[in-house]
Amino acid sequence: MSALTETVTTDADLGRQRLARAALSYLAEPGDPALGTLLQACPPDQVLAAIKAGELPRACRETDRARWAALARALSRWRLRLPDLPPEDRLAARAAGDARIRLACPGDPEWPAALDDLGLAAPCMLWLRGNANLSATAGRSVSIVGSRTATGYGAHVAGEIAGDLAEQGWTIVSGGAYGIDAAAHRGALTAGGVTIVVLACGVDHAYPAGHDTLFAAIADAGLIVSELPPGSHPTRLRFLVRNRIIAALTGGTVVIEAGERSGALNTARHAAELNRPLMAVPGPVTSAQSAGCHRIIRDFGGTLVTCAEDVRGMLEPIGADGWTPGRAGSGAADPRDDLDLESARVLDAFPVRAIVGLSTIARKACVEPSTVLRCIGVLAGFGFIERADGGWRLTRKAV
């Protein structure tokens, strides 16, 4: 078989697997560990074929009886949604990506490896809308979440912390809700930074509807992300399951104003379980809106923070693969010694005083564009480079 034929075959297989992942997003609810189990044993197209046939793949038939029964029940649940699958040509167009919506799948250059920390509950793919690259922007990110019924104090603090962090090159991630979420997104946008909203509905559906203008601005400067396919509507459970993505995608979580029953506490629990830095902004001891934040500090081991510098102190130094939760640097005398070979090569390709784009860096470093995307997150995390109008440039630290 010629090299060209091998390439075509590989590309065709990748396209088939992406199409299968897109289809699975219509059939299984986000975070279903049964789907994670099957995807560990079989490629996505075989899982999809098994659902259509109503029979478990051979690789899963030799598992213990209880697990086999659970997987069989999951197959039956998913089969009920087969009529909801779009026509294959329409699904293929969505899987290939169009001008507005595209897919990110495990193994793609745009896929954030941090999501794999979710194990069997990791998303099988993500739907994206927006102009930013998910892996590059999530490589130096922090989530800011809190109450939908924020006070003026909470909204002010959220906007200020988000804006200050965004100015320093951090991506702000939140859930797009009223209150603290919206204040954090707007703070990042006002500072000219990047922000990501993770939705519990399709990326083509503005929820809440009053944020359609905000979401349009986020798509221009950042990303709208969801596990659910276009056209999906939110449910209470989907909001809770969505929160694990917010926690896993980012280097740490900051909670600003959360009541005792706030959904932000759910995000905080995910962050703690994933060993991500967990932070909370205190409020008046008489305020029910801050009772959840005080509980995070008291019972969850969260760190009290009051400003962007406090947050940065919890998230830095950054590990050699971008950020690595809970891990400090190696203590090398020169921070460049902590860089992997490819990241060091990309750093050397930066001119001293010019702003350059990713394609220029790829050419000068003689590496693949996907490699540059990974290394950009690493270098930004170490503070060697920063975003600028039209591209990236070295910081004073690197000169």
Image: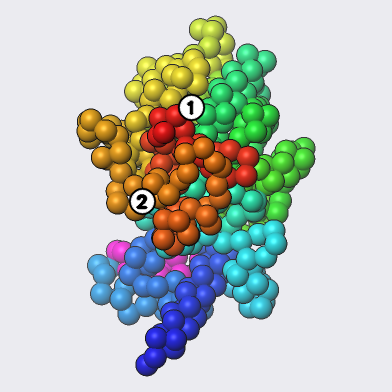
Vertical relation: 344 (above or below) 328: below
Q: Quadrant of residue 296?
A: top left
User: In this view of the protein, which residue sits in the foreground, 345 or 64?
Assistant: 345
Total tally of numbered discs in the picture: 2
Reply yes or no: does residue 49 show up in magenta.
no
What residue would you read off at disc 1? 254
Residue at screen point 39% across, 66% down: 39
Q: Position of residue 167 (x, y in %)?
A: 57, 28
- Name the front one of labels 1 and 2: 2
Tag of residue 345: 2
**Quarter that holds the C terminus:** top left
Amino acid carrying mark 1 in the image? Val
Specify whether residue 141 is in view: no
Q: How is the image coloured?
A: rainbow
Provide the residue span drawn in magenta. 66-77
Name the main secondary structure of what is drawn in magenta.
Answer: helix
Specify whether residue 389 is in view: yes
Q: Would you say the residues marked 1 and 2 are in contact, meaning their CB atoms lie under 8 Å apart?
A: no
Amino acid carrying mark 2 in the image? Arg
Q: Secondary structure at mark 2?
A: helix
Relative to 386, 70 lies left or right: left
